[in-house]
Image (spheres, helix red, strand yellow):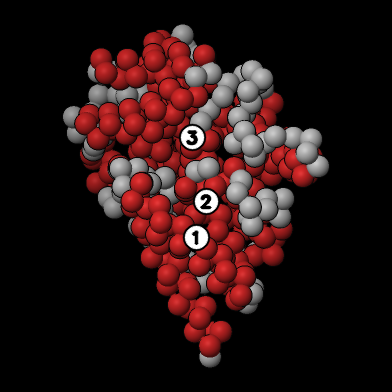
Amino acid sequence: MSATYDYDDTTGGAGRSNYDEQSGFQRQELGYDPNYVPDSVKSFVVHLYRHIREKNVYEIHQMYETSFQTLSERLFKETPWPSVDAVAHYVDNDHVFCLLYREMWFRHLYARLSPTLKQRIDSWDNYCSLFQVVLHGVVNMQLPNQWLWDMVDEFVYQFQSFCQYRAKMKNKSEQEIALLRQNDQAWNVYGVLNFLQALVEKSSIIEILEREKEGLEQFTATDGYDYSGGSNVLKVLGYFSMVGLLRVHCLLGDYHTGLKCLLPIDISQQGVYTSVIGSHITTIYHYGFANLMLRRYVDAIHEFNKILLYIYKTKQYHQQSPQYEQILKKNEQMYALLAFVFHFVLK
């Protein structure tokens, strides 16, 4: 992937690890038993599983946003969570729940430690399995928008992280190079784009947003949730995947295509993308950045100003959020980009 600009988009989800690959591996090995499950973790997975089965979105959100972060800070600050095999029997070996648990497991690993090559590949395989279930299976659950956004956000982040990892071949061992060759489809750019595009198409989200303009849908009014007993997962993943496509195309330097992917979302209005602050900031950041690179400076200035004012007014309410550091970092980046744009406009 050729870089055509100095573009820092290396944070996603909670704060990212500064450990190198070897030290991260050593921290995982020292004193870590993947089969040991503390009582608090047993309680966590049992209750989370129950709430997912009952479609209790409020409780799922509380456990996902608060309990998971609290347990991570208290018990797994420098180690991974227990393996999925160790907790599976507490949740009836439910296949979909185990995929969701592993998605959180890998996200925690990326945030707190540094994944090995094998773990990077395993995370790709887990996303493939999870998205295949969503695309081709019967998913009868409701998940919080925050979690669904984090899935897309982390998927793109891990793709970028893998590209950066793979580009540094100088210090790779023969075993790592052989493993890379054996798994050349892992985090392949076409695979990433295909999954995101498939989620958009299978969800029919573009048609849903069109019907909403005619008063035939209530997608935005309900924040994407289905109050008739159905599932919000595919629709909301498809919605956030449009933002994911914008972000990937920005990474590839294809700004026209990126903006085209976002066209179905009217960013001049409140929408589901504004229901999650990470989604809101990411959407406007990349929209503004793409316009900047296309020399549409007025559009870039307008959107950067709007989101910076929003962050200024609301950041105090997110100080306890795991996304707080990322919010501050994106805030600084956008101020720098805004100064950069003004330089060209006033020149």
Amino acid under disc 1: Ile
Report if the CB atoms under discs 2 and 1 are less than 8 Å apart. Answer: yes
Mark 3 = which residue? 147
Residue with the most extreme left position: 31
Q: Judge whether residue 96 can be spotted in this image.
A: yes
How many C-alpha atoms fall within 10 Å of the one at disc 1: few (<14), some, or many (≥20)?
many
Q: Which residue is mark 2?
A: 280
Specify few, some or many for label 3: CA neighbours under 10 Å numbering under 14, 14-19, or 20 or more.
some
Residue 124 visible somewhere in the drawing: no
* Quarter of the rendering occupied by the N terminus: bottom right
Question: Which of the labelled discs sits on residue 8, or is there none?
Answer: none
Q: Residue at x 45, y 62 (%)?
A: 309
Mark 2 to mark 1 CA distance (whole Å): 8 Å
* Residue at left offset 56%, top offset 54%: 283
Left or right relative to 80: residue 52:
right
Residue 116, quarter of picture: top left
Q: Is residue 129 above or below residue 272?
A: above
SS assignment at label 2? helix
Q: Residue at x 53, y 27 (%)?
A: 143
Q: How many marks overall?
A: 3
Name which residue type carries label 3.
Trp
Which one is in front, 325 or 134?
Answer: 325
Location of residue 55 in the rendering, given as x and y in whole percent from the top left corner: 53, 18
Specify the quadrant of the image occupied by residue 175: top left
The one nearer the camera, 220 or 249, is 220
Where does label 1 land, which residue?
Answer: 307
* Helix, strand or loop under label 3: helix
Amino acid, disc 2: His
Q: Position of residue 7 (x, y in %)?
A: 48, 66
Q: Earlier in the sequence, mark 3 or mark 1?
A: 3
Q: Are marks 3 and 1 in contact (CB under 8 Å)?
A: no
Residue drawn at x 49%, y 54% as measured from the top left: 281
